Image: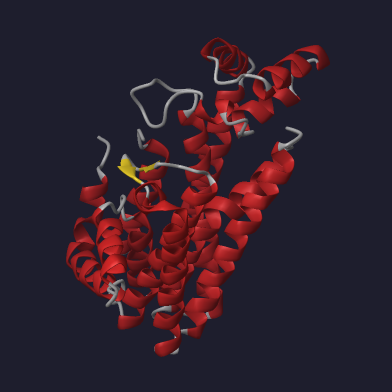
Amino acid sequence: MKISLNQIQAPIAAEMELFEKKFRSSMQSRVLLLDKIMSYIVKRKGKQMRPMFVFFTAKLCRHGEITDATYRGAALIELLHTATLVHDDVVDDANYRRGFFSVNALWKNKIAVLVGDYLLSKGLLLSLENNDFDLLKLVSNAVREMSEGELLQIEKARRLDITEEVYFDIIRQKTASLIASCCAVGAASVNSSAEVIEKARLFGEKVGIAFQIKDDLFDYGTAEIGKPVGIDIKEKKMTLPLIYALQNTDWLTKRKMIYLVKNNNGKNDRVQQVIDFVKSSGGLNYAIERMTQFHREALEILRTFEPSPSRTSLEQLLAYTIEREK
């Protein structure tokens, strides 16, 4: 039986509730407009997976205990990550995020950019005022990698020449670096050794890669599950199933499929041709194999830690990343 995210979160329900209060207070402002926008952002929070990774990893490394630094580390990640999302919506000219209007859709681009800057500064100050330099370094590295990953994807997407190696470079930076920093911050917040922090970071990186491959697979699922079918293809994004299929076909078919991706113009019949090609070429099966491999490698790292309720919860969270339906 599949376990829900709420069930996984149950052992840290009290910590998450306290974190919510601390996080809300860290976003408050004396500027009425800014405070209104902050309240709106807090209300549309997502699955809260990032704080969960921070708390469970901290408990894993300190026999069930966490510190004030753990709460600050989780808040730092949420502040900096939220800043990047607000800026992303401006860059992408997106009007919605998680089914809600984006900040830029409601308050226009100028205000959205300033809100992102504000969130970034709040995160930096939270760390500096508490001398959490080690946590700030870990999260700042993740933000840098996320930016580099996005730019690498833009650079390569223009020619649709992304190899499997480049694809993994992109998702390691774009997606996995954030989950990796959550686990590293959790370990660092309870004064773990450099070796343990790196082990936690590597665990998170492998979870993040498996998570992104699962996201890629949603593009080939049914319309009822996850994002709309074919959205990556419509946006000319090169994901693992498509990359594998293109690398394992004849030159003429490859040329035709790249043409369809480049010139799909949102037409469902062209998108469907690409989806059918990927499925018949074994692209989905290959992506599932690679996702399972990263899941297995993450589990091997996790099981080098002593058995504990937190380790069990992280095993469940790891399983959730590849079994989720959206």
Above or below — where is 217 with respect to 4? above
Above or below — where is 326 with respect to 128? above
Nearest to the observer: residue 207 or residue 145: 145
Residue at point 33% right, 23% down? 224
Q: In this view of the protein, can residue 303 be seen by the observer?
A: no
Nearest to the observer: residue 273 or residue 32: 32
Residue lying furthest right in this view? 251
Where is residue 199? Give x, y as percent: 53, 66
Q: Name which quarter of the figure residue 37 lies in.
A: bottom left
Relative to residue 307, is residue 273 drawn left or right?
right
Q: Name which quarter of the figure residue 140 lies in.
A: bottom right
Residue at point 49% right, 50% down? 90
Nearest to the observer: residue 194 or residue 243: 243
Residue at point 73% right, 41% down? 156
Nearest to the observer: residue 84 or residue 296: 84
Relative to residue 170, is residue 29 drawn left or right?
left
Q: Name which quarter of the figure residue 255 lies in.
A: top right
Above or below — where is 234 with respect to 34? above
Where is residue 33? Give x, y as percent: 29, 66
Residue at point 27% right, 51% down? 44
Q: In what quadrant of the picture does the N terminus appear?
A: top left
Where is residue 43? Give x, y as percent: 23, 55
Q: In what quadrant of the picture does the C terminus appear?
A: top left
Above or below — where is 242 with respect to 254? below
Relative to residue 185, is residue 30 drawn left or right?
left
Q: In this view of the protein, can residue 232 be seen by the observer?
A: yes
